[in-house]
């Protein structure tokens, strides 16, 4: 697929609809795009490659876009293999090409490829420029958005920000899908832990006059950039995007599920407008992680299990911990037949997170929800509904 981003910048990326799981863990019902670009000027620069899975298609796209010219530079913004997986194919095809990266880029490139030294290379630092003709790229380091070597670049001629994984989304480019949902799921699961690094990059980007954002996944963004940048500011500052409650449950035989659904009903009866219920045994984990960050409150309902909490809840909490979940309000419902202990196990993880407010009361159910639990269920629902009203 070759298309124009501007008169002299072409898209040469590839859609991947055959991949089962992106990064071996994320379902991608609409596939994923590996974006790559070519800048045709006095000098020709390739901006990132694609996953090895698509290297043949990419080389064809590249060849077409070059229209008989030879590339002078390959710019490597990010060494993760969904973008740098075809660097060696590129070098093999164009042995005279000059690689452009920062010091860490080349360390990782050697680690991945076993190639000790690259004779044709330019090592860039913050603020360094690369003049291609009319186009001039300025390199901006973006460490930990979301790997240490990540950098972005700004083309002053077309006012393009080549943003690496920033502003990316799941989904191939030939499907019609709104941006926000899959961009949010992508952000929180992949970049989420590094909010402070994203904030630093946003501050640097604010000083630039940007007309187009070219990410390494998802569509090229050229309209309403304030909307996307605004969402990135919300997400990276861990500010809830919307008022709402996620009720996430972990149930072995269904009784905790009944209690969770009943709790959601009570919330709705008490006037809560947005309540989302998710089954941690069956719903996609990355989607539930997205919901937890999206809304301002979460209620966790779980069965006790072997002196702890049912594993899918444990797994969920550890996903949240690994993504630096913070600044949220949490309600807890536990269930147990022998001696309920799920709440203690959940609290142990939650207490290690930053700015988590655990509401009272904690609801304890013995095996199945009964009338005797309804007082606490209502009290917790009141606490959830009235929190920050
Ligand atoms: C393998 C296994 C381990 C369990 N461990 C505990 C436990 O440590 N403490 C406890 O009170 N109940 C324990 N239970 C009982 C369940 O927590 C109980 O049946 C559950 O609360 C019922 O809710 P559910 O229908 O949502 O699964 C265990 C059940 C199973 C199957």
Image: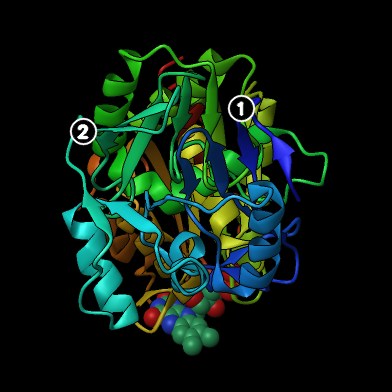
User: Is residue 378 in view?
Assistant: no
Label 1: which secondary element: loop
Across and down, in percent, residue 27 comes to: 65, 64
Picture quarter containing residue 249? bottom right
Q: Which residue is mark 2?
A: 128
Q: Residue at x 61, y 70 (%)?
A: 55
Task: Give whichever of 143, 389 is nearer the camera.
Answer: 143
How many marks on residues? 2
Q: Residue at x 73, y 46 (%)?
A: 2
Q: Which residue is mark 1?
A: 221
Above-or-below relation of 35 to 285: above
Task: Give whichever of 52, 282 is nearer the camera.
Answer: 52
Task: Give whichever of 175, 292 is nearer the camera.
Answer: 175
In the image, is 280 to the left or to the right of 229? right
Across and down, in percent, residue 95 comes to: 42, 69
In the image, is 127 to the left or to the right of 278? left
Task: Give whichever of 186, 48 is nearer the camera.
Answer: 48
User: Is residue 41 in view?
Assistant: yes
Q: Residue at x 67, y 34 (%)?
A: 179
Across and down, in percent, residue 366 comes to: 50, 67
Picture quarter containing residue 236? top left
Q: Residues within 10 Å of mark 1 (few under 14, many from 20)?
A: some
Q: Residue at x 51, y 58 (%)?
A: 49
**Sequence-first tag of 1 and 2:** 2
How far apart, in angstroms, are the residues tagged by discs 1 and 2?
Answer: 25 Å
């Amino acid at each position: 697929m070759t298309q124009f981003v501007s008169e002299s910048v072409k898209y040469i990326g590839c859609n991947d609809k055959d991949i089962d799981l992106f990064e071996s863990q994320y379902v991608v019902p609409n596939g994923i795009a590996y974006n790559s670009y070519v800048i045709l000027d006095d000098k020709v620069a390739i901006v990132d490659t694609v996953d090895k899975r698509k290297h043949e298609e990419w080389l064809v796209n590249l060849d077409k876009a070059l229209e008989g010219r030879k590339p002078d530079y390959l710019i490597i913004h990010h060494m993760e293999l969904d973008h740098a997986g075809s660097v060696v194919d590129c070098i093999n095809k164009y042995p005279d090409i000059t690689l452009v990266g920062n010091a860490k880029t080349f360390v990782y490139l050697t680690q991945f490829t076993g190639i000790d030294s690259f004779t044709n290379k330019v090592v860039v630092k913050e603020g360094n420029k690369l003049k291609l003709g009319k186009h001039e790229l300025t390199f901006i380091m973006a460490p930990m958005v979301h790997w240490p070597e990540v950098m972005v670049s700004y083309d002053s001629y077309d006012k393009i920000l080549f943003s690496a994984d920033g502003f990316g989304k799941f989904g191939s480019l030939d499907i019609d899908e709104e941006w926000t949902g899959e961009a949010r799921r992508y952000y929180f699961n992949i970049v989420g832990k590094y909010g402070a690094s994203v904030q630093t990059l946003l501050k640097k980007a604010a000083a630039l006059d940007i007309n187009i954002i070219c990410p390494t996944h998802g569509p090229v963004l050229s309209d309403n950039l304030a909307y996307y940048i605004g969402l990135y500011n919300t997400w990276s500052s861990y500010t809830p995007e919307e008022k709402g409650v996620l009720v996430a449950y972990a149930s072995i035989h269904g009784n905790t599920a009944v209690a969770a659904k009943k709790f959601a009903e009570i919330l709705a009866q008490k006037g809560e407008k947005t309540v989302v219920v998710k089954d941690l045994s069956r719903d996609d984990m990355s989607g539930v992680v997205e919901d937890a960050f999206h809304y301002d409150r979460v209620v966790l309902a779980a069965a006790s299990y072997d002196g702890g909490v049912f594993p899918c809840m444990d797994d969920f909490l550890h996903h949240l911990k690994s993504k630096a979940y913070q600044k949220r309000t949490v309600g807890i419902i536990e269930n147990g037949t022998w001696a309920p202990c799920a709440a203690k196990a959940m609290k142990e993880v939650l207490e290690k997170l930053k700015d988590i407010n655990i509401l009272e009361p904690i609801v304890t159910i013995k095996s199945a929800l009964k009338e005797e639990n309804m007082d606490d269920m209502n009290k917790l629902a009141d606490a959830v509904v009235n929190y920050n009203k």
